[in-house]
Amino acid sequence: MQIGPAVFSYLADKETKKSIENNTPSPIVSGAGNYKLWLSLLVRYLYCEHLELTEDNIFAVLYAAKKYLVTSLTRRCVTYLESILSPENVCMFLENVFLFEDEYPALRQRCFQVMHVCNQLP
């Protein structure tokens, strides 16, 4: 059990160093570029199958799930995103969804639908 956290800590430090050396921002908006945060959330899910998704951590968790091919967590994240999508957060969600390129077309389409409905209101 002790080697697991050390491996993930190494991965987090490696990702952070690579990002700094290449002068590239994290691919996640909303200040979620803290690799240690999303790796700790991913490890918690992998070991305990428990994870509290929030609007603040959802895109970091989705990024980690996609990066490490944890498809069950990816599906859970997309379902959660669809359930909390609202006119108040649609722009931020859409901006983040575009960072994932064409991987979530249904979620992108749902964002556009919410924006369209908001534009129709008087």
Image (cartoon, rainbow, N blue to C red):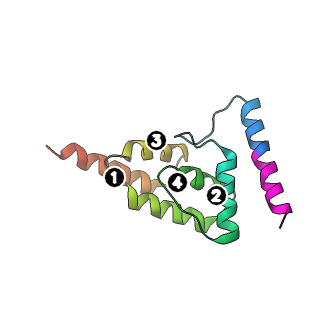
Residue 104 horizontal side relative to residue 86, left or right: right
Query: Is residue 122 positioned above or below 42 on the image?
Result: above
**Residue 40 sits inside the magenta stretch:** no
Expressed as whole percent of the image width and height from the top left, the position of residue 57 reads: 54, 51
Instruction: Please name the amino acid that badge 4 sits on.
Output: Ile
Give the Cα separation between the discs numbered 2 and 3.
22 Å
- State which mark lies toward you, 4 or 3: 4
Determine which of the numbered discs, if any, sits on residue 107 in the image.
Answer: none
Disc 1 residue type (three-letter):
Ser
Q: CA distance from mark 3 to mark 1?
A: 14 Å
Per the image, the residue denoted by label 3 is: 95
| Whether label 2 touches label 4, CB < 8 Å | no
Residue 93 location (% of width, % of height): 44, 47
Give yes or no for contact between labels 3 and 1 (Cβ–Cβ under 8 Å). no
Circle 2 Cα neighbour tier, 10 Å, few/some/many (<14 / 14–19 / ≥20)? many
The range drawn in magenta is 1-12
Among numbered discs 2 and 4, the one appearing first in the sequence = 2
Residue that appears at 59% across and 55% down: 61
Q: Amino acid at mark 2?
A: Leu
What secondary structure is the magenta-colored segment mainly? helix
Q: Secondary structure at mark 1?
A: loop
Report helix, strand or loop for mark 2.
Answer: helix
For the point 57% across and 62% down, the residue is: 74
Q: Upstream in the sequence, badge 4 or badge 1?
A: 4
Q: In the rendered image, which residue does mark 1 sit on?
A: 86
For label 2, the residue is: 41
Question: Quick check: marks 1 and 2 in contact, CB under 8 Å?
Answer: no
Q: Residue at x 30, y 46 (%)?
A: 115
